[in-house]
Image (cartoon, rainbow, N blue to C red):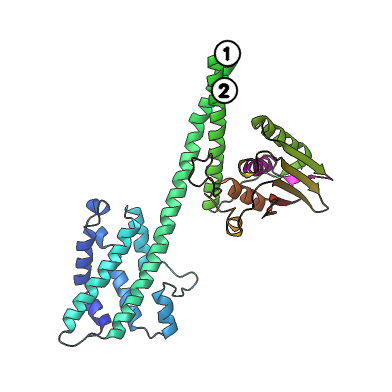
Amino acid sequence: MRLADFILRNTGRIVAVWEEFATTLLPAARSMDSLALRDHAPQILQAVAKDLLTPQTREAQRKKSMGQAPRLLGAPETAAQSHALMRARGGFNINQLVAEYRALRASVLRLWIDECQPAAPDLDEVMRFNEAIDQAVAESVDFFHSEVEQARDLLLGMVGHDMRSPLQTIQTTATYLAALNAGEKVSEAAARLIRSGSRMNSLLNDLCDFNRTKLGLGINITPDDVDLADLVADTVDQLRAAYPARRIDLEVKGNVQGIWDGPRLQQLLSNLVLNAIRYGAPDEPVRVVVTGHDAEVRLEVRNSGPAIDPLSLQRLFDPLRRGPDQEHKNADGLGLGLYIVSEITKAHQGSIEARSDQTGTAFDVRLPRRR
């Protein structure tokens, strides 16, 4: 008997085995009824049978075995994709999702081989069946991953948003305590609260910005007339006050006015300078150079120190990454600073480049004067 015919004739029997295995996938399966446990199993089996009955070239089979079967634009979700979404929303994990397909593969082949006795099964059909299951697994895993990622990003967004209110209360109370002049100990404690609150607020800002980019919303900017000379000078003064032991040199050349989001550019510059302070030679200055050109303004931040290896240099702007000497330490930050810098630059339709050699590392940001 052909495998496709066997699947179509015995769908109910195969689905019963699927359900029996699904009941073992705890804790998610504990609260699910028979219909939910079976989910899209009949449709997945029908799709596999249809695939087995469809003539295919060797190249098409090869692509399918790697989960790369082509799909028409605008085509509806496959049964495997819909199944993945339901399993993700039902609390299954990725290992349990794949385990369902592993059990399905084994049970179908075992039942079919028993049915074929005493004749030997057609190995070409076995191969075609495995390719169809591999394609279904690839579709399910891809959709499952996307659903979990989106749920996580939404959760991060809500957490970041809801934490702002209590944090603002803490900072306001600390500022009130600092203004009371209630003694040196109270003033010192209030100052620590203010600094910690400011740092937490910065982390929340990075987290919320990262979350927006993951949701496809991009960095939000509000362009206005900006004089970078004043903005950069103010930002550098704040950083000098926060890091009095480090020297930060500033040079501004030419006309540096344009249409940008001022606070976002302050955030960009702060992240670049903080990165230079963290990884640069402590006895050498951090240099900030702002240069006006006809159509754009160039902002460069340089620091002395050891060269960054080429592989690390290519991944500097990846999110949730820190420098190699900070990976296993309790580093201050989420590893989002340079990623946020890159996203702010993109939002202004600019470009950013990192260079590094034995003399040090430089970040070169180019901002068009008008969006």
Q: Is residue 195 left or right of residue 86?
A: right
| Furthest residue toward bottom | 119
Residue at image x 29%, y 72%?
45
Answer above or below: position of 246 versus 99: above
- Total of numbered circles in the picture? 2
Residue 257 colored in magenta in the image: yes
Q: Is residue 304 left or right of residue 170?
A: right
Q: Is residue 101 left or right of residue 222?
A: left
> Residue 241 location, x and y as percent?
67, 29
Main secondary structure of the magenta stretch: helix
Name which residue type carries label 2.
Ala
Secondary structure of the residue carrying tag 1 is loop
Residue at image x 43%, y 49%?
152
| Furthest residue toward top | 182
Mark 1 residue crowding within 10 angstroms, few (<14) / some (14–19) / many (20+): few
CA gap, disc 2 to disc 1?
A: 12 Å
**Residues in magenta, as a range:** 254-277
Considering the image in quadrants, where does the N terminus appear?
Answer: bottom left
Mark 2 residue crowding within 10 angstroms, few (<14) / some (14–19) / many (20+): some
Taking depth in this image into account, of 232 and 245 the one nearest to the observer is 245
Taking depth in this image into account, of 233 and 312 the one nearest to the observer is 312
Mark carried by residue 180: 1
Q: Quadrant of residue 85?
A: bottom left
Answer above or below: position of 169 versus 55: above
Where is mark 2, residue-wise?
Answer: 191
Closer to viewer: mark 2 or mark 1 = 2
Secondary structure of the residue carrying tag 2 is helix
> Residue 9 location, x and y as percent?
21, 78
Q: Is residue 369 visible?
A: no
Residue 300 colored in magenta in the image: no
Q: Earlier in the sequence, mark 2 or mark 1?
A: 1
> Residue 150 location, x and y as percent?
45, 53
